[in-house]
Amino acid sequence: MTPSIYISFFILTIALVALDIYQTRGGQVTIRKAAIWSAFWFLLAFGFAATIYLFWDFYAPVSAYSPEKATVSFLTGYLLEKSLSVDNLFVFAIIFHQYAVPAHLRPRALLWGVIGALVLRAVMIALGAQLLAQFHWVMYLFATFLIWTGIQLARDKGEDEVNPLPERLIRHLVPVTDNYHDNRLSVVKNGKRIFTPMLVVIAVIAFMDIMFALDSIPAIFAVTREPFLVLAANVFALLGLRSLYFVLEGMMNRFVYLKPALSFIMVFIGIKMALVGSAWEIPTWISLSVISATMILATIASLYREKQTVVVTDKNS
């Protein structure tokens, strides 16, 4: 992969982030508008997959991947990252509730969260690719971490609050106002610079981005070790995250089987990573099928569970 390809993709990413900023201007995002843009970002990812299939020899002329393998690897990585990013949305909802973030300020807070995630994941992808290229045993370390994370996720009973470490650190270092001041991170009062709760919210989101990246980056390296495909899958998965949040904001309590589904996916991907290079290596197309089927079944089961709950409630009324 030549530097010019990465530079061009960086420019494309900046343009798409600017588009995302433009479509959420004013701070008001309706469910209908968010649903339309979520569909747009989803179709855009599949459009990019088509360019990989058609122009892979231009993207990576010396890659060992065929256009077909590169396309399937991108789509599998994209769906994996999209599935794992849904869990981010639940944490974002907890953060907004915990810090009483006004509705019109949430798009900006999510924007900073997405930008932070993009930067952090780009760094971790670069480091991860170098480690895997030089030390194959790192694959087994990542695999163990993923399986352990999946088991821990299955045992998790849910938390009412996120880790307050970033908040404690910020309040220890700088003064913070009690009230929000629009989107501003700081204001000047009596000649002194004072920071707003928005800074705390963004810091907490960034902290959680790091935690989620520790899960998702090893997971996608089990799908493909081509750095460009890993980066592209992460970028497209994160670009639609803000719109998807506003679609799911009022529906989050309905997806009761999301965590078991994500837990299964993490363990499965961990096993896949451990088997890379062996006679039992799991093909990428099987991973794509397993991830898709797991999320579809979790969604259907959650909706069925909700329907049964409504029926029981009506009978008892």
Image (cartoon, helix red, strand yellow):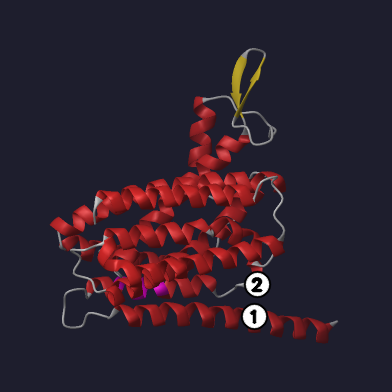
Asked if the magenta segment contains residue 29, the reply would be no
The location of residue 294, given as percent across then percent down, is: 47, 80
Q: Is residue 166 above or below residue 120?
A: above
Comes first in the chain, label 2 or label 1: 2
Is residue 147 visible to the viewer in this orientation of the structure? no
Secondary structure, mark 1, is helix
Q: Residue at x 27, y 51 (%)?
A: 126
Under mark 2, the amino acid is: Arg
Dominant secondary-structure state across the stretch colored magenta: helix
- Looking at the rendering, the stretch of residues picked out in magenta corresponds to 265-270
Q: Which residue is mark 2?
A: 254
Under mark 1, the amino acid is: Leu
The location of residue 312, given as percent across then percent down, is: 76, 85
Q: Is residue 203 above or below residue 17?
A: above
Is residue 129 visible to the viewer in this orientation of the structure? yes
Q: Residue at x 51, y 49 (%)?
A: 17
Q: Residue at x 21, y 66 (%)?
A: 140
**Residue 131 marker:** none
Q: Which residue is mark 1?
A: 303
**Residue contact at pointers 2 and 1, CB within 8 angstroms:** yes
